Amino acid sequence: IQNVLAVDTSNKAAYENLARLYYDRGRLKDPSYLVLANLVVTQALRVLDTVVANGQTAKVFVEFSALLLPKVISIALPIAAFGATLYAMNRLFAESEVVAMLAAGVSGLALARPAAIFGALTMAATAASTLYFEPTAEQTLRDRVSEIRADVANALIFEGRFLHPSRGLTVFV
């Protein structure tokens, strides 16, 4: 098996073809990253109205969007990990790697161990996101939204403009 897998690095064309093969097979052919972008945008739209209605800056919108990321992570991470595991296992089966490993004497438990460890790490990351980061970020977001809504002066008074809040009243700051 080692002779089959060995690559002659002196043969530059063969080495480049092998690198191109791994590069082409490894990258995503479909725009699945758009699903994640859609998830982020739908969460960000929750706070967009508050930011725009109160005349806040883009910095505040970015801050609010960052505070929504733990919720996105807790939704997307398990799905992405499941898809990645299925993809990897399908590749191993399609290229007969599993058959070769079983023929070499590797046990089924040893084959399942990497997927189980990856699943446990994903579970731990999702639990941390769901149980700690998401509630903390949600509370911080609620506090910041309350601060912004309470800051009426910032929403109504603009520097260098004549404002007419009611009939017969003109304010210039």
Image: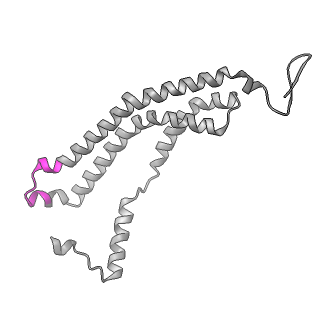
Image quadrant for the C terminus? top right
The image position of residue 48, as x and y in percent, is 62, 32
Q: Residue furthest bottom?
A: 10
Towards the viewer: 70 or 2:
70
Residue 84 shown left or right of residue 69 in the figure: left
Residue with the most extreme right position: 168
**Image coordinates for residue 131, horizontal then vertical, percent:** 37, 28
Image quadrant in which you'd find residue 104 = bottom left
The boundaries of the magenta stretch are 101-112
- Main secondary structure of the magenta stretch: helix
Q: Is residue 104 part of the magenta span, yes or no? A: yes
| Percent position of residue 100, x then y | 14, 61
Quarter of the rendering containing residue 98:
bottom left
Q: Residue furthest front?
A: 173
Residue that appears at 23% across and 56% down = 92
Measuring 47% from the left and 43% from the top, which residue is drawn there? 35
Q: Which quadrant, please, contains the N terminus?
A: bottom left
